[in-house]
Image: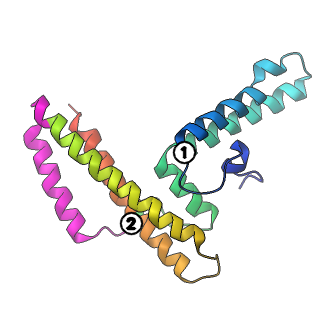
Amino acid sequence: MDAVNHFERLGLPRRFSIDPAQLDRAYEERSRAVHPDYHLGGSAGELAASLDLSAAVNEAYNVLRDPFSRADYLLRSDGDVTPPGNAKLQPAFLAEMLEARERAEVARGKPEEVTKLETEFRSILEGEIGKLALLFSRYEACPAVDPSRANFGTQIRTLLAQAKYVRRLIDDLHAA
């Protein structure tokens, strides 16, 4: 992994919960500071370094602005090598999502129903991300040597998978 992590690159604390406005401000400041347009008068080496730094700042921003990639990045940087799609979803959640998918199929082509379902599904997604933030705060407070940290990581992977499932459900509402 890069010697400077994405959080350090943007001058942000290393944690799951990030204020989106603070993230945007940090990105804009760092991006301006390293943008190649400001280094055109420098040497070829300075321009190349500026291009590399600009790409790294953009990558950091893209990873950290999405809660799913931010969570995966945090877990991986802590040594969790579990593939993101390998979480075991709870049977109750799967049953709820199967029913939701059926409702989405019935609503297809009915704009008012689609809007109503999208609102409902976004509320579910926000709830999953809220649970994720809460669980991450416990994970982040837990010392790396504490055996319960791995359990938190497993729970986070499950919540991530559930949230991704709901996000796909929202995306599918608008698929042709």
Contact (CB < 8 A) between labels 2 and 1?
no
Q: Position of residue 144 (x, y in %)?
A: 64, 76
Decide which of tag 2 and tag 1 comes sooner along the chain: 1
Q: Residue furthest top?
A: 41
Q: Main secondary structure of the magenta part?
A: helix
Q: Amino acid at mark 2?
A: Thr
State the extent of the magenta-drawn residues as a range. Answer: 87-113
Residue at (68%, 37%) from the top-left corner?
57
Q: Is residue 145 left or right of residue 97?
A: right
Residue lying at 29% horizontally and 45% vertically, measured from the top left: 122
Q: Is residue 39 above or below residue 34?
A: above
Q: Is residue 80 visible?
A: no
* 11 shown above or below 15: above
Q: Residue at x 56, y 66 (%)?
A: 81
Q: CA distance from mark 2 to mark 1?
A: 24 Å
User: Pointer 1: what residue?
Assistant: 19
88 in the magenta segment: yes
Quadrant location, the N terminus:
bottom right
Q: Residue 153 magenta-drawn?
A: no
Three-letter amino acid code of the residue under disc 1: Asp
Residue indicated by mark 2: 158
Q: Secondary structure at mark 2?
A: helix
Residue 29 position in % (x across, y down): 71, 31
- Is 162 or 44 nearer to us in this picture? 162
Disc number lying in front (2 or 1): 1
Residue 24, horizontal then vertical, whole percent: 59, 35
Can you give x and y, in whole percent of width and height, for residue 10 in the image? 69, 42
Q: How is the image coloured?
A: rainbow
Residue situated in front as seen by the camera: 150 or 22: 22
Element type where label 1 sits in the image = loop
Q: Residues within 10 Å of mark 2 (few under 14, many from 20)?
A: many
Q: Residue at 58% across / 59% down in the picture?
A: 74
